[in-house]
Image (cartoon, coloured by chain):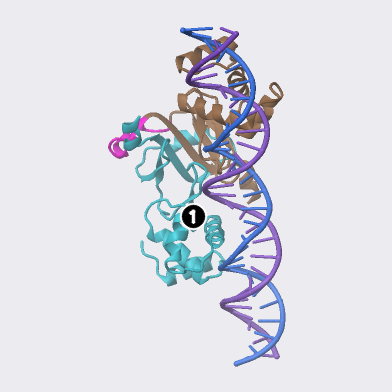
Chain colours: A brown, B cyan, C purple, D blue
DNA sequence: TATCGGATGAGAATGATTATAAAACGACGC
DNA sequence: GCGTCGTTTTATAATCATTCTCATCCGATA
């Protein structure tokens, strides 16, 4: 998935975001990077193209993108924000020890049964499911 | 689930932990509290019984308990550690916005299908699944 | 061109967590 | 009971991610 400037312009317009050079570069950095990166990682990548950019700008825009739904947040990481540019429906496989995240696909959740267990009012319109376990490396270590 | 001193002693012995007064109080505070509490919450509760206890001790012991498997970590919370004293198999329902966690039971995951998607070596012996959505309150706000 | 609102940059502030070092504790042998 | 040794706790400093503040900048519009 390669984002052209025009595509970002469209996306931003759709969500009512002003298009700035910094936003474009930040967004492209996230999309270009496959994986689940921290703001620091993205900051480092973006600095190569916009050396004067501030870390706060990266944070601001990531938060903005997440709010608007342009990006997803990868939540379970030990106390640090990660973002995910993969907007296709997928779930996450997380190593409880090293906190590495991999995407996982497949239709392994019975949403009918799940809905029956949900408390009233809970909204699962865009369910994201994170499955925890031990990755191969961490299992070997133990 | 009410933990007596003896039960904690046994548990600690089984995991090779020395039993100290502070540990006992911290552990009981977690078990007594239904919900998913932060170290600060637990610190506040424990101080009522051991006013001189230090926050670092709470952190140290929570970490220790998690490592030993006496407690589970509730990971997805926005950048702050939560612990879960419920050791029965269950999953978590997390509000993406306010980060509230509720326990959820039910057999809604097809582990056979899930295993087929797992990369080799990934260990799911104690799978914990977290399902994200919007809780009633946050949905109402939006 | 002058104005205005939002965006950015730099650095300070905050808040959670961890590290450190000294004091206290507790089990053990004497 | 008493000193010893390793462990635990306490208090506090340090660290790290993230957010805030505010002065400046930029782009759109009148």
Identify the image quadrant of residue C22: bottom right
Q: Is residue C6 above or below residue D21?
A: above
Front residue of B39/A107: it is: B39
Identify the image quadrant of residue A134: top right
For the residue labelled by badge 1, is the local secondary structure a helix, a strand or a loop?
helix
Q: Where is residue C17 in the image (x, y as percent from the top left)?
A: 57, 51
Q: In which quarter of the image is the C terminus of chain B?
A: top left
Q: Which residue is drawn at 63% across and 32% down?
A: A55
Instruction: Determine which residue is flagged by label 1.
Output: B39
Q: Which residue is drawn at 42% across and 36% down?
A: B97
Q: Is residue B38 above or below residue A85?
A: below
Q: Position of residue B136 (x, y in %)?
A: 31, 36
Q: Where is residue B28 in the image (x, y as percent from the top left)?
A: 43, 64
Q: Quadrant of the N terminus of chain B?
A: bottom left
From which residue to which does the magenta span run? A108-124
Mark yes or no: residue B108 visible: yes
Q: Residue at x 55, y 14 (%)?
A: A8
Q: Is residue A62 above or below residue A138?
A: above
Is A61 on the left or on the right of B108, as rendered? Answer: right
């Amino acid at each position: 998935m390669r984002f052209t400037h025009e595509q970002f312009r469209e996306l931003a317009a759709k969500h009512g975001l002003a298009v700035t050079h910094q936003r474009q570069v930040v967004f492209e950095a996230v999309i270009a990077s496959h994986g689940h990166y921290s703001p620091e990682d993205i900051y480092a990548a973006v600095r190569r193209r916009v050396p004067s950019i501030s870390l706060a700008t990266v944070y601001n825009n990531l938060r903005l993108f997440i709010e608007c739904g342009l990006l997803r947040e990868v939540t379970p990481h030990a106390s640090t924000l990660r973002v995910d540019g993969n907007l296709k429906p997928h779930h996450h496989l997380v190593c409880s020890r090293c906190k590495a995240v991999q995407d996982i696909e497949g239709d392994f959740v019975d949403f009918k049964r799940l809905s029956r267990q949900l408390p009233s009012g809970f909204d699962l319109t865009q369910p994201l499911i994170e499955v925890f376990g031990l990755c191969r490396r961490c299992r070997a270590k133990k």
